[in-house]
Image: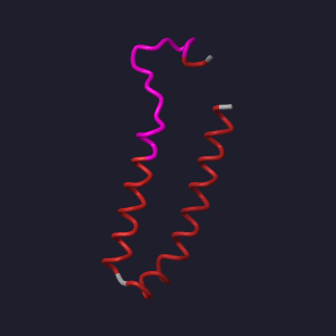
Amino acid sequence: LRGKGAGLAAAIAKVGAVLTAFLFPVLLAEIGVNLLLSGLIATSLLGALITWQFRIETTGVSLEKIGS
């Protein structure tokens, strides 16, 4: 299950990277540098908040308990 999740996350990241490469010049021309970079910052912060919210704390927990 962990491998499938990691694979899915990697695939989504690659799709995002490709879309960013194609959309960046278009968005730069349409909305400008400040708004584009602000949007990228907001997206990154949102991703960090979601990751923080759904993290699994493993400090002091045995590998056997984490795996079950």
Residue 22, compared with residue 10, is above or below; it is below
Total numbered badges shown on the rendered structure: 0
Query: What residue is shown at x 50% (from left), y 84% (from top)?
Result: 26
Whether residue 22 sits left or right of residue 25 in the image: it is: right
- The single residue placed furthest to the bottom in the displayed view is 29
**Image quarter of the N terminus:** top right
Q: Which residues are magenta?
A: 50-65
Pick the residue in front: 50 or 60: 50
Residue 38, compared with residue 11, is above or below; it is below
Quadrant housing residue 68: top right
Q: Position of residue 27 (x, y in %)?
A: 46, 81
Q: Position of residue 33 (x, y in %)?
A: 34, 80
Residue 46, compared with residue 63, is above or below; it is below
- The single residue placed furthest to the left in the displayed view is 34
Query: What residue is shown at x 42% (from left), y 61% (from top)?
Result: 43
Whether residue 9 sits left or right of residue 30 in the image: it is: right
Q: Position of residue 50 (x, y in %)?
A: 45, 46
Pick the residue in front: 62 or 56: 56
Q: Position of residue 40 (x, y in %)?
A: 40, 66
Q: Is residue 2 a member of the stretch shown in magenta?
A: no
Color theme of the render: secondary structure
- The single residue placed furthest to the front in the displayed view is 53
Query: What residue is shown at x 40% (from left), y 14% (from top)?
Result: 60
